[in-house]
Image (cartoon, rainbow, N blue to C red):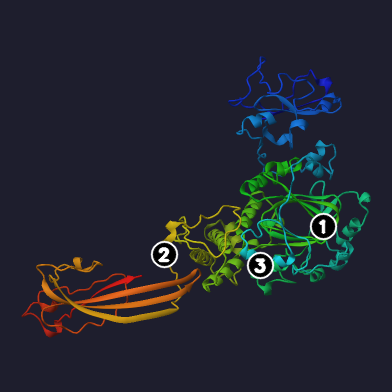
Amino acid sequence: MARAKRRGGRANAGSQESQEHADASAASAGSPAPTENGAQGHPSSSHQDDDSCPACSQNEKQEDKEAEPESWVRCDACRVWFHWRCAGKGELEAIDKWYCRPCLDADSKRVITMKPPARKSSRKKTQRDYAGLHAGNESDPGRWLRMLEGKDIKPHSFKRMKGSEVTLEWLESDPTAMTEPVLIESPDGLGMKMPSEDFSVSEVAEIVGEDTPVEVIDVATQSNVPGWTLQKWAEYFETEPAKRDKIRNVISLEISGTSLADKILPPRLVRDVDWVEKFWPSTKRGRGHTYPKVQLYCLMGVQDAWTDWHIDFAGSSVYYHILHGEKVFYFIRPTPSNLAAYERWSGTEMQNHSWLGDMCDDVYKVELKTGNTMMIPTGWIHAVYTPKDTLVFGGNFLHSYNVATQLKVREIEIATHVPKKFRFPFFSKLCWYAGEKYLRDLKAKEEFPSRVLDSVETLADFLVSEARAIERGTEQAKKEAKDQVPSERVKDPGAMARELRWRVKFASGYTSDDETSHHKRKGKGTASSSVASLGEKRKRGVEDDEELRPFRNFKPRLWDKVKEVPVKDETRSLKRKRVVDLDPWVGGEDLEEEEEGEEATIRRRTNVVVKVRKTAKGLERQRLERVTEEWVWGDEMKPPLVSSSIPVDATASLPATVNGANGSHEEGARKEEDETPPVPMETETAA
């Protein structure tokens, strides 16, 4: 563990070192050799001045630091002390193991690590602004910007697209579509409607209602401030920046069902894929109805406002249009490791003093100006800075191109105890509506891109887990899960969820429908999979060429064309012993002549049936060849038997007792009605 200490300037040079943490573990092999006094020396210096460190510049060494306490950190390899301001990066309090640059360069296995977050107690605690207390100011909105100083922020390389290019066809044909943020500089061609650029916050208050309550955020503490109305907010917003008492922000004014909503239309692509638009019954949404109202938000931020790191609820995607003003976004990819770091950071005291970017791989910066529109994909972690007063319209939407990440973010919300008030409204009910519609589509043999099939498969697994909660959960869990099922559409949740899973797995090319087994996928759909945010299924290999087995209770579609080829007859003779045991006769190969056998006449008829039907991947053609053989011993020939049997893989049927000619019973005991006609042997092959 990295050792840290704080001390003043020359006045404290001879004082005992103050230790805040336990000693680090012994240095690893290959570290610099110990010096005479027992401490390990640094490669670049044999001793260390009381007030300077090996990373200090000459000017810094000459500065007088008597009035300012200094933070020090010791390298866990060479055990040399450094000024944190000279050699460190990020927050010293969050460091677990720390190495200086020469030691990092000397051994690539050394990695600077962070401390895990403290375990949270279930007891309520008074919320305190630790960063503000540390800086001597409990309400300093500028502390968020100071965290940015010296951080490694990378310029983005995200796509810039024309509005006319952002279409459903792009989403279905490009496997990378909606896996990274997309910047659209002009709204032309987006199929979007917005108010004019001179539309003001006062007009928002006037149209929506001046007495309408609005949730206002105090930027310094990132907490809600009660008692605000739109009229009060408009007056504050139009106050000169220098005269505002605090920096505040509004990011959650949902305007669906208001007159202002009539002036706004989301982009065409959003309307095409939005689950609420596609699956929530149109008779149950709109004014006067309860449904997920997340499509139309008005965001009003003043100069220097900051929204800390977050993921939009349920990992929903976002469209974001700058009506006037500017915004600066900081993005972190939703990789498994970054999402895990976000989960550790979220809801803990680390939020007040730690920069999340220090715990993740890369942070990307995107600047938006008046007229710009941005699409933010599923699960992207982001923070937002407002350089000047800005008015934004945007909205959230769930879709079928990355359900796995949407559900992963929902799990994080549950794990970090996000209040239900701040989660996606009616999330489970919307999933049931989506699942029910996809089940109907799969029954109707509709085809979907593989990205959608992957998502529907994940959705089906989630719905099965919800059904299990109804079937086996506690009384409270049963009630909560059952309340989310739209009973007018879903009569039997368990049956619906499991049938959806069977059908989507069959459509995706899996070979098992066992609820508890590991499924083996045999093929892919019509498009490539989306970004591997949570892992990818393996690609089809040579071992996948075997025929797919049908699922239990699954009825394939009827054949489109069936043609029977004319019958071919042939007669031949062969010596063969009369039938005593049936086993030698059931083989699939042709029978050979036996020296001690009797002469038998064989009449063989060949019948070929060809069937074809269209499939999701092309065409299925089945060729059935049925061969019927009639064996007769003796001189008397009987008419050939006309078979009416249904083709099977391989069958053989012969008389049970054959001592006389033609398979008859013993002479002297035979009656006419007991005569057994010769029964044909049939074989069938499928090509």
Q: Amino acid at mark 2?
A: Arg
Question: What is the number of the mark on residue 549?
Answer: 2
Q: Residues within 10 Å of mark 1 (few under 14, many from 20)?
A: some
- Tell me, yes or no, if residue 359 can be seen here: yes
Q: Which quadrant holds residue 437?
A: bottom right
Using the image as rendered, state which of residue 555 and residue 488 is in the foreground: 555
Quick one: label 1 or label 2, which is nearer the N terminus?
1
Residue 102, position as x, y percentages in the image: 68, 29
Which residue ends up furthest to the top in the rendered image? 36
Name the residue type under label 3.
Leu
Q: Which residue is mark 3?
A: 168
Q: In the image, 353: left or right of 616?
A: right
**Measured along the vertical axis of the image, is residue 295 above or below residue 99?**
below
Q: Amino acid at mark 1?
A: Lys
Disc 1/disc 2 C-alpha distance (Å)? 56 Å
Task: Name the image quarter holding residue 447.
Answer: bottom right
Q: Position of residue 448 (x, y in %)?
A: 56, 67
Question: Is there a contact, CB below 8 Å, between mark 3 and mark 2?
Answer: no
Mark 1, residue position:
369
- Using the image, determine if residue 540 lies above or below residue 493: above
Q: Residue at 61% across / 34% down in the picture?
A: 108
